Image (cartoon, rainbow, N blue to C red):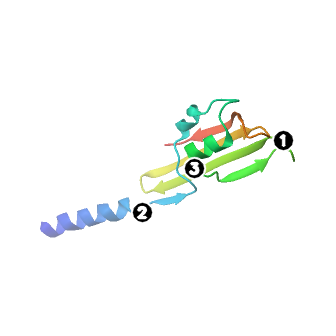
Amino acid sequence: MKQLVVAVALGAVMLTACVRTTGPQFDVSAIERLTPNVSTRADAIAILGPPSAVSLVRGDGPELLQWIGTSATFLGDKGQHVALLFDASGKYIRPTHVFQTR
């Protein structure tokens, strides 16, 4: 009986340790703390961490910052993606994409 308990406990520990994470892990709901035309690029990075990708919409115009993260366990997958638009001066305009699975 003791061996069965040890085997089950060891198996549970090994299964919970099987987590694969790609990209930053962040709180999608944190973007609610950003205020359009007030918050800055630096504010977004302070809240969400470094972005996964940065794209210029036009050479000297708006900038799109994206945060993309995934994690997978034997219990299921979780994915999240946030894309935020900033004007040329670094002021937050609006989210262009917000997605999260559980």
At horizontal 73% and vertical 40% (from top left) the residue drawn is 90
What SS does tag 2 mark?
loop
Image quadrant in which you'd find residue 33: top right
Label 1, label 2: how far apart the Cα atoms are: 43 Å
Q: Which of marks 1 and 2 is in front?
A: 1
Local crowd size for mark 1, using a 10 Å CA cut-off: few (<14), some (14–19), many (≥20):
few
Q: Which amino acid does label 3 sit on?
A: Gly
Image quadrant in which you'd find residue 44: top right
Q: Quadrant of the N terminus?
A: bottom left
At horizontal 18% and vertical 63% (from top left) the residue drawn is 5
At horizontal 49% and vertical 61% (from top left) the residue drawn is 20
At horizontal 51% and vertical 48% (from top left) the residue drawn is 78
Q: What residue type is labelled 2?
A: Cys
Q: Position of residue 51 (x, y in %)?
A: 64, 51
Residue occupied by mark 1: 61
Circles 1 and 2: CB atoms closer than 8 Å: no
Residue placed furthest toward the bottom: 3
Residue occupied by mark 2: 18
Residue occupied by mark 3: 49
Q: Which of marks 3 and 2 is in front?
A: 3
Left or right position of 16 against 100: left
What SS does tag 1 mark?
loop
Label 3, label 2: how far apart the Cα atoms are: 24 Å
Q: What residue type is labelled 1?
A: Gly
Circles 3 and 2: CB atoms closer than 8 Å: no
Question: Of the residues under marks 3 and 2, which one precedes in the sequence?
Answer: 2
